[in-house]
Amino acid sequence: MPPLLDSRKLHAFTTLARVGGFTPAARELHLTRSAVSHAIRSLEEDLGHRLLDRAGRRPVTLTEPGRRLLERARVILEEMKLARTTLAAEQG
């Protein structure tokens, strides 16, 4: 069975897709640019697909697999957030 997707990598991916660059994504995530780059590269290896077109200093663009993943990743991360919120509300 293939490994499960890592939520940290998905979060880095969705942030990068939203802000359009590694440096702004790193800033927002409080990580180094290298850490964001590594997370994306690792996610691409996990999935066996190139998710981004990297073109120097221009904003990154998503490949077709990247666009499909972005749709699912947003849902997955929202569900994870909802699960945490629901459990926290039940404790309170």
Image (cartoon, grey):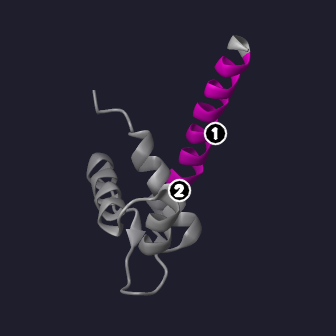
- The structure residue drawn at horizontal position 73% and vertical position 19%, both measured from the top left corner, is 89
Q: Name the dominant secondary structure of the magenta segment.
A: helix
In the image, farthest residue toward the bottom: 57
Q: Residue 78 carries which label?
A: 1
Question: The C terminus is located in which quarter?
Answer: top right
Label 1, secondary structure: give it: helix
- The structure residue drawn at horizontal position 44% and vertical position 40%, both measured from the top left corner, is 7
Q: Are marks 2 and 1 in contact (CB under 8 Å)?
A: no
- On whether residue 9 falls in the magenta region, the answer is no
State the residue in front, 55 or 36.
Answer: 36
Q: Residue 24 carries which label?
A: none
Question: The N terminus is located in which quarter?
Answer: top left
Alpha carbon distance from label 2 to label 1: 11 Å
Q: Which span of residues is magenta-colored?
A: 68-89
Looking at the image, is 71 positioned above or below residue 4? below
Residue 86, position in %: x, y?
70, 21
- On whether residue 81 falls in the magenta region, the answer is yes
Residue 4, position in %: x, y?
36, 33
In this figure, which residue is indicated by the disc labeled 2?
Answer: 14
- The structure residue drawn at horizontal position 53% and vertical position 65%, both measured from the top left corner, is 17
Residue 60, position in %: x, y?
46, 76
**The residue under label 2 is which amino acid type?**
Thr
Question: In the rendered structure, which disc, 2 or 1, sits on the residue that comes first in sequence?
Answer: 2
**The residue under label 1 is which amino acid type?**
Glu
Residue 21, position in %: x, y?
47, 74
**Residue density around tag 2, few if under 14, some if 14–19, many if 20 or more, within 10 Å:** many
